Image (cartoon, rainbow, N blue to C red):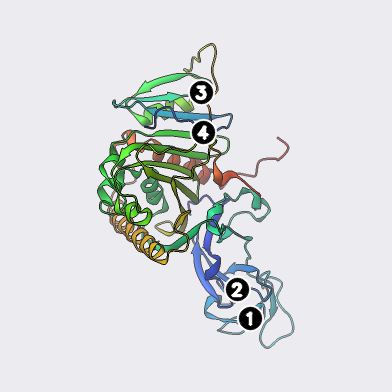
Amino acid sequence: MTFARNHWYVAAYGREIGRELFARTVLGEPLVLYRSEEGEVVALADRCVHRRYPLSESRLEGDTIVCGYHGFTYDKTGSCVFVPGQERIPRTARVPSYPVVEQDSFVWVWIGERDRADRELIPRAPWLADPAYTTVCGMEPLAARSELLVDNLMDLSHETYLHGGYIGTPEVANTPITTEVDEDNRIIYVSRHMDDAACPPFYAKSTGIDGRITRWQDIEYHPPCLYLLHSRVAPVGVLPEADGSDPHGFHVEVVYAITPETEHSTHDFWAVARDFALDNQEVSAFLRDSNRAVVLQDVTALDILERVIQTEPPDRQELSINIDTGGLAARRILKRMVAEAGEPAKSAAT
Amino acid sequence: MSHRVAMLRGDTVYRIHWEPGTDVLVGVCHCGAERGSEDPADLWDWLLAHPDGHAPPAAVSPPTADRQPVGAAHD
């Protein structure tokens, strides 16, 4: 498997995990997740050590999972605490457990080397759990490799062609970008600031702006998993105040968590947080439906692309142009992260 | 427009600006060296080869950054 294993990935929304056993595959590893009686999220390998039966198809009893096939019973750490018909529990009777952190409404999981799972490495998406924002969110399964979704999100000029009528207008594809890479901190930033642009329905209907807009798109990608799009719209010419405050701008924080399921499929988590019309249910429903429609347009296109790529040799020719500057930077960092998966940890003292 | 925006503040930030009204990209290394190109792949190759082929100007003004990357902020 070719994954950047020693990184945090979003396995689920916190609200998805309760007292029912929940199955999800991350980086090719089938996981079973549940919430303990004290409320903490537990992630174990989803295969009984005995005959590989999925623990997610089993039963939760207190904080233990009782295998639905022969009754092997595992505690929160993955240790087997009961086997049927005998006293002795074999020393190897345990399933892997995975470090988990709940943060910003996500359940983050670490699949790689356990002693390298530093929670301080998890990038933040604070709006998703901030009462000053209202968030709509979802997850769509993608039958395509995660790299295709990264390519897609790093180049928003595709909005003009794939998402016309929702979020795309001609100005998106026609406006130059600035791309920055922080090599040490591994952040890629792509800015596209449109001074005078048509207002797409996604923003016209949600903000009530009638007319043309100043539209800023600032992508902040923390590879491999977290993608943030800081979107600011305002009537043409309305800019933030000199002190940095922005009372007349509308802010939408679009968050994606890009989690490989297998080498050829991806969990496409999406969330849209806004700082306006906070209690307006119609706006929430509109943004949820519109963004999901946009995500599904991407899913349809990327699923097609995955099928095409699988029929072609791996050294197929591509052509990159200016709009791909950010995507190329992301590909390079992701490639390095995958290569590092097999390397020993760097000494903290150096 | 997005001309010469600078958001990131790290010590090793590489930037590629797209000159408005043209197809020209300008790569700016953290050492101050600059190069124009119409091929982003070539430009990344040049930037990442630092310091090979880089001739920074005598004095470099640090770019201003008016936004901290939010995802990197920890409690």
CA gap between label 4 and label 3 equals 36 Å
Q: CA distance from mark 1 to mark 2?
A: 8 Å
Gap between marks 3 and 1 measured at Cα: 57 Å
Q: Chain of mark 1?
A: A
Q: Residue at x 67, y 72 (%)?
A: A76
Return the x and y of residue A34 as percentages of the image width and height: 59, 72
Per the model, the C-alpha gap separating discs 1 and 4 is 64 Å
Q: Which mark is residue A242?
A: 4
Do callouts 1 and 2 mark residues in contact (Cβ within 8 Å)?
A: yes
Mark 1: amino acid: Phe
Q: Residues within 10 Å of mark 2 (few under 14, many from 20)?
A: some
Residue bearing the label numbered 3: B50
Is there any visible trace of residue B68 in the rendered image? yes
The kind of residue on which mark 4 rests is Ala
Which chain contains the residue that carries disc 3? B
Characterize the local packing of mark 1: few (<14), some (14-19) or many (20 or more) Cα atoms within 10 angstroms: many
Mark linked to residue A248? none
Between circles 3 and 2, the one closer to the viewer is 3
- Marks 4 and 3: same chain? no
For disc 2, the marked residue is A49
Q: Secondary structure at mark 4?
A: loop
Q: What residue is pinned by disc 1?
A: A72
